[in-house]
Amino acid sequence: MSDTQASKLKVEEPLVPIFVMGKRYEIPASLTIQKALEYAGYQLVRGVGCRGGICGACGTVYRVPGDHSIKVGLACQTVVERDMRIAVIPFFPVNRKVYNIRDVHPGPEIFAQFYPEIMRCMGCNTCTKSCPMDINTMEYISAAIRGDIEKAANLSFDCVMCGLCTARCPGELAQYHIGILARRVYGRYIAPKATHVREMVGRVMQGRYEDGLRRLMATPIEELKPIYTKREIEPELSKDEWAPKSAENL
Ligand code: SF4
Ligand code: SF4
Ligand code: FES
């Protein structure tokens, strides 16, 4: 018996009808769209990745009865509704500018230089309303139009590049490529440098951890397990100055 058949037998909750690209299926009401597709027998090879709302692979368009508006969401995060009509759009075509971040000039003109269509934005806010990550997409596009790299980078930080805003933009912008351009330029040229990372890389390059790594690699797995389970873990929400009790491996 397949996993899908076994899971169907265990289902005791009410089923609701949904329509996947026009075809009707009866689905347990608590499933996400992604799980509903698998329950219905689809094998997902595109339009699926992390299953946790992070990778942006599962952009989905749907409508529900009694509502004229097109709705969008991530299939792995959106629970099915009775009679919803669904189409998963795992890829929406856009033109991506190819550049070497080391060679760009990090000035305010960079967005119009690489993506001149940004000036076609008419401020309709459809992108913001389409965003499953609750990002103020129009606001980061506005910041990019003004050449405010830092603001565009910060406002677009949670973008998962699902493309749902792009699919609906009447100005035909590729917002998420504009956002990642902002974050790359900001990270490379504007953000304060992380000195502790540079120091740590220096220690690694000087061989500070070579002996410890060799010892670990030579240790049998049964001896490694208690070392791993007893290791000191940094508490959640610890203060910046937190450090482990032993400085042996710092
Ligand atoms: S959907 Fe497009 S045109 Fe409308 S505000 Fe967003 S970027 Fe501008
Ligand atoms: S800004 Fe656009 S691409 Fe990024 S998460 Fe929101 S809808 Fe998806
Ligand atoms: S599968 Fe990664 S966001 Fe849905």
Image (cartoon, rainbow, N blue to C red):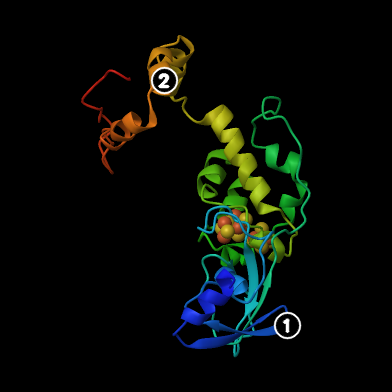
Write down which quadrant ligand 1 falls in. Answer: bottom right
Of residues 187 and 223, the one nearer the viewer is 223
Answer with left or right where residue 236 lies relative to residue 31.
Answer: left
Q: Is mark 2 within 8 Å of ligand 3?
A: no
Pair 2/1: label in front: 2
Instruction: Specify the farthest residue to the bottom.
Output: 66
Q: Tell me if 35 is positioned left or right of 230 in this view.
A: right
Q: Front-most of 168 and 92?
A: 92
Q: Position of residue 55 (x, y in %)?
A: 57, 52
Q: Residue at x 72, y 55 (%)?
A: 173
Residue 90: image location, x then y, percent: 69, 61
Q: Secondary structure at mark 1?
A: loop
For the C terminus, the image quarter is top left
Q: Kindly identify which numbered label has been placed on residue 22.
A: 1
> Which numbered disc, 2 or 1, marks the residue that appears first in the sequence?
1
Instruction: Work out which residue is located at the far left of the displayed protein and give it.
Output: 245
